[in-house]
Amino acid sequence: MDRRASAPPSATRPARRDRQLTWLFDLDNTLHNASAHVFPHINRAMTAYIVEHLALDHAGASRLRQHYWQRYGATLLGLIRHHAIDPAHFLTLTHQFDDLGSLLVTERGLRDTLRRSPGRKIVFSNGPATYAEAVLRLSGLRDCFDAVYAIEQMRFVPKPAPAAFYRVLHAERLDPRRCIMVEDSAANLATAKRLGMKTVWVSTSLRRPPHVDIRVRSVLDLPHRCWPL
């Protein structure tokens, strides 16, 4: 066989993105204020789901929901591991909204801030894909991002588990040393930092954990604090 006729590896593989700066943005309480209206709605739906499917009273279901969220980073993972709950069924029933747009609280100027930021931008969320896409579309932010990774793409293993991060890094062919994670969860940022990422904590806290490189009150503060990090 004429080896010269073979296509070089660069002609058959997608270009690597190792050297390109990539921002990984959490969704809830990072790109919008989920605590105001969205989280209370989801929490009520999750508690009702647990009441119905695990035969607990409301108080017991609420405690179990919070326990699994604190232990695993997502209530869903605890229900899968300990109760064999079907994840697709759970996500569908607990993320139904009559009018999601009316529940969203976003900041004016966020779209402009994201669009003029350097590098690629990816949403990395523990929420389901349909919900994440709807939030981004309704808030006018979808075209600011090159990709959206939701809990389904992580095979229902949420942040802060390293496996969730590895799936995004592998799928996008990213070097974690060229990634910046923007999150409201300090626990999720701890994993990002261990993997070699720069970390930005969206928080009003006065303290800054050692695994946080920069703390901002809002994503709107990123141009003043992080360009470039």
Image (cartoon, helix red, strand yellow):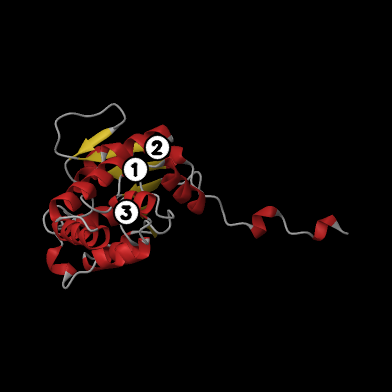
* Residue 125 visible somewhere in the drawing: no
The crowding category of the residue bearing disc 2, from other C-alpha atoms within 10 Å (few below 14, some 14 to 19, many at least 20), is: many
Type of amino acid under label 2? Met
Q: Determine whether 138 is above or below 37 in the image.
A: below
Q: Of callouts 2 and 1, which one flags the residue occurring earlier in the amino acid sequence?
A: 1
Residue extending farthest to the front is 55
Q: Secondary structure at mark 2?
A: loop
Q: Please identify the quarter of the rendering in which residue 47 is found.
A: bottom left
Q: Position of residue 227 (x, y in %)?
A: 30, 41
Q: Of callouts 3 and 1, which one flags the residue occurring earlier in the amino acid sequence?
A: 3
Q: Determine whether 131 is above or below 110 in the image.
A: below
Viewer-proximal residue among 20 and 30: 30
Q: Position of residue 132 (x, y in %)?
A: 30, 61
The crowding category of the residue bearing disc 1, from other C-alpha atoms within 10 Å (few below 14, some 14 to 19, many at least 20), is: many
In three-dimensional space, the C-alpha distance between marks 2 and 1, rounded to whole angstroms, equals: 7 Å
Residue that badge 1 annotates:
181
> What label does residue 168 carry, if any?
none
Q: Position of residue 118 (x, y in %)?
A: 35, 49
Q: Please identify the quarter of the rendering in which residue 229 is found.
A: top left
Residue that badge 3 annotates:
76
In three-dimensional space, the C-alpha distance between marks 3 and 2, rounded to whole angstroms, equals: 26 Å
Q: Secondary structure at mark 1?
A: strand
Q: Position of residue 206 (x, y in %)?
A: 14, 31
Q: Report if the CB atoms under discs 2 and 1 are less than 8 Å apart.
A: yes
Q: Determine whether 218 is above or below 206 in the image.
A: below
Q: Report if the CB atoms under discs 3 and 1 are less than 8 Å apart.
A: no
Type of amino acid under label 3? Leu
> What label does residue 197 carry, if any?
2
The crowding category of the residue bearing disc 3, from other C-alpha atoms within 10 Å (few below 14, some 14 to 19, many at least 20), is: many
